[in-house]
Amino acid sequence: MNVTKAEIAVSAVKPEQYPDGALPEFALAGRSNVGKSSFINKMINRKNLARTSSKPGKTQTLNFYLINESFYFVDVPGYGFARVSKKEREAWGKMMETYFTTREQLRAVVLIVDLRHPPTKDDVMMYEFLKHYQIPTIIIATKADKVPKGKWQKHLKVVRETLNIIEDDKLILFSAETGQGKEEAWAALERFL
């Protein structure tokens, strides 16, 4: 996909703040600091539209990025970050659950996992949550540039088996550094547009 326009449209914490209209949305979920913002930036060929940080827990709202005036990427807070209060984590969880379970414009969730490590318990819980609600999911195994090419299939197998990925869901090897998997990710997303 050729991205000619991308902008942050709104940051929201409750449904009445979500963008109006019927444009399709793709939510990006994953643990804190897994690379959700880097994924967005690579996909749209921008360096800093979605702010990246070495500090986990930077995203604390649902950030709606309008792409080509035709759909949204929705960056959601990362899970599994311990440096916020339990109350704050619960609030984020409720905010995300409300979005995932009630938003009609949501076409699919892009679940981003780190290829270097087996998916965490939180990754498994998120995937099971998405499957429980029958939300189409695209799994992006990112940071492929940090794993030797000869070990990619072994690592992908661990991701596939740990998450118990169903046949309908796509697992894509990705690198925000090299662009590996970018075209495949766009192809997977475009199925839902």
Image (cartoon, rainbow, N blue to C red):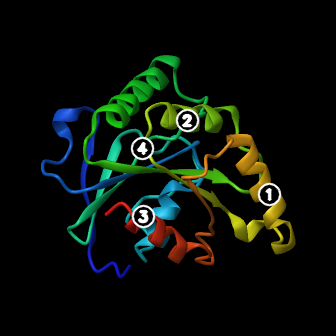
Q: Nearer the viewer, residue 51 or 69?
A: 69
User: From the image, which quarter does the C terminus lie in?
Assistant: bottom left
- Tell me which residue sits at (39%, 65%) in the image: 191
- Tell me which residue sits at (43%, 42%) in the image: 135
Q: In the rendered structure, which amino acid carries the disc numbered 3?
A: Leu
Where's residue 54, x and y in %?
A: 59, 53
Front: mark 2 or 4 = 2
Circle nearer the N terminus (1, 3): 1
**Pointer 3 residue:** 189
Front: mark 4 or 1 = 1
Q: CA distance from mark 1 to mark 2?
A: 19 Å
Disc 1 to disc 2: CB gap under 8 Å: no
Q: CA distance from mark 4 to mark 3?
A: 17 Å
Residue 144 position by quadrant: bottom right
Secondary element under disc 2, as helix, strand or loop, is: helix
Q: CA distance from mark 1 to mark 3?
A: 23 Å
Q: In the rendered structure, which amino acid carries the disc numbered 1?
A: His
Where's residue 159, x and y in %?
A: 72, 50
Question: Is 92 left, or right, of 104 in this rendering?
Answer: right
Circle nearer the N terminus (4, 3): 4
Circle nearer the N terminus (4, 1): 4
Where's residue 142, x and y in %?
A: 64, 61
Q: Residues within 10 Å of mark 1 (few under 14, many from 20)?
A: many
**Pointer 1 residue:** 155
Circle nearer the N terminus (2, 4): 4
Circle nearer the N terminus (2, 3): 2
